[in-house]
Image (cartoon, rainbow, N blue to C red):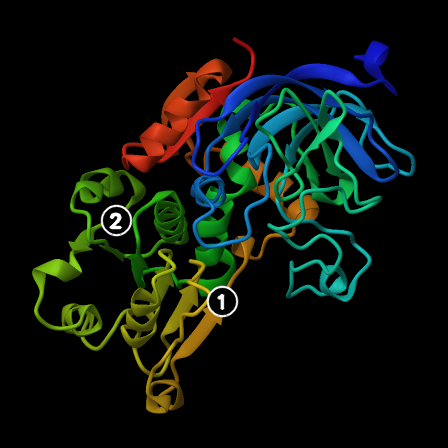
Amino acid sequence: MSSTVGKVIKCKAAVAWEAGKPLVIEEVEVAPPQAMEVRIKIIFTSLCHTDVYFWEAKGQKPVFPRIFGHEAGGIVESVGEGVTDLAPGDHVLPVFTGECKDCAHCKSEESNMCNLLRINTDRGVMIGDGKSRFSINGKPIYHFVGTSTFSEYTVVHVGCVAKINPLAPLDKVCVLSCGISTGLGATLNVAKPPKGSSVAVFGLGAVGLAAAEGARIAGASRIIGIDVNPRRFIEAKKFGVTEFVNPKDHEKPVQEVLAEMTDGGVDRSIECTGNVDAMISAFECVHDGWGVAVLVGVPHKDAVFKTHPMNVLNERTLKGTFFGNYKPRSDIPGVVEKYMNKELELEKFITHEVPFSEINKAFDYMLKGDSLRCIIRMEE
């Protein structure tokens, strides 16, 4: 790779020219990394629902043309000025949020919400100089959440890059750079279910199933999956889910159904849908005295969370989490080791694989609800 250091690289990228239209494989120019940046050769990437949401651009500011993608594994090609803890050849996971290691959040043991590098979905340029590193015929193509992994090469701020064990298979651990870590960490780092406890998981997509996997690892005795799509129940058994509730099958609110099933409420609940009614149910279904509910899903911008104050006064706890409370550089290498030590299974999250030239198939699978994670192989 040394022959490309300091030079513009021409490579293939899947460009979204406009909202909701199929991505187009184009030749793009990728500029060298500037100060505190890293250029990465992407080996495998995967599609997350967040990519689809911002590609559809129904509820937020559209930024196009753009290169999406934020779950990936790759190898460092070159580093910019000031980068000392990464070198060409390192195996890495780019992450949509960062860890500058200097701000109050990074210095706090409780927070992972870096002031400098926190997710920004509207920004389509690098934080250092306000410019894009991607172009076609001199015209900029915008970045997405600082990662833009639907490109054979990408440039990322060093604070958003986790250096991992080079023996870890990138086609498996790439899924840890977003959704799986989010759900897993929501359970292990925030809900912290005691061994033998009962855990309810609202929403059985990839993030919810990762939350269930966390409950399985923690030794929960009952893991109750709640979803309006009964097709998801069969798949969820692989992730340790022991019981299922479809709110559509019941006249009464699902929190009352769960309270009856568990003698007053579950010990922990994790909400992974972003639906505000599910959030309220997730809080109200936990046991008084010790129950903890954790919100993971991102709600509609106008959503309002309403519950009676007695639900809080009766010693229920409501928590929120972002990226499972993992600090990207400090913690994600350890999550990769959980996989390497066979504590965490990733294969069951990966339902499809396509070559880069067929990336639009990954969108089709997700839109139809057929896939959990579709791996996109960059080398044909």
Q: Which amino acid type is marked by label 2?
A: Val
**Secondary structure of the residue carrying numbered label 2:** loop
Disc assigned to residue 320: 1
Where residue 162 appears, as percent x and y from the top left, is 68, 38
Residue at image point 46% right, 49% down: 184
The number of numbered badges drawn on the structure is 2
Residue at image point 33% right, 85% down: 311
Residue at image point 66% right, 37% down: 142
Q: Is residue 243 left or right of residue 60?
A: left
Where residue 61 appears, as percent x and y from the top left, is 55, 52
Q: Is residue 372 left or right of residue 51?
A: left
Where residue 227 appears, as percent x and y from the top left, is 23, 53
Disc assigned to residue 241: 2
Q: Which amino acid type is marked by label 1?
A: Gly
Where residue 130 appears, as percent x and y from the top left, is 79, 45
Residue 169 visible (yes or no): no
Q: Residues within 10 Å of mark 1 (few under 14, many from 20)?
A: some
Residue 356 position (above or below residue 46): above
Judge by depth and name the residue closer to the eye, 100 or 58. Answer: 58
**Secondary structure of the residue carrying numbered label 1:** strand
* Mark closer to the chain start, 1 or 2: 2
Image quadrant holding the N terminus, namely top right
Residue 328 visible (yes or no): yes
Residue 19 position (above or below residue 28): below
Q: Is residue 40 left or right of residue 238?
A: right
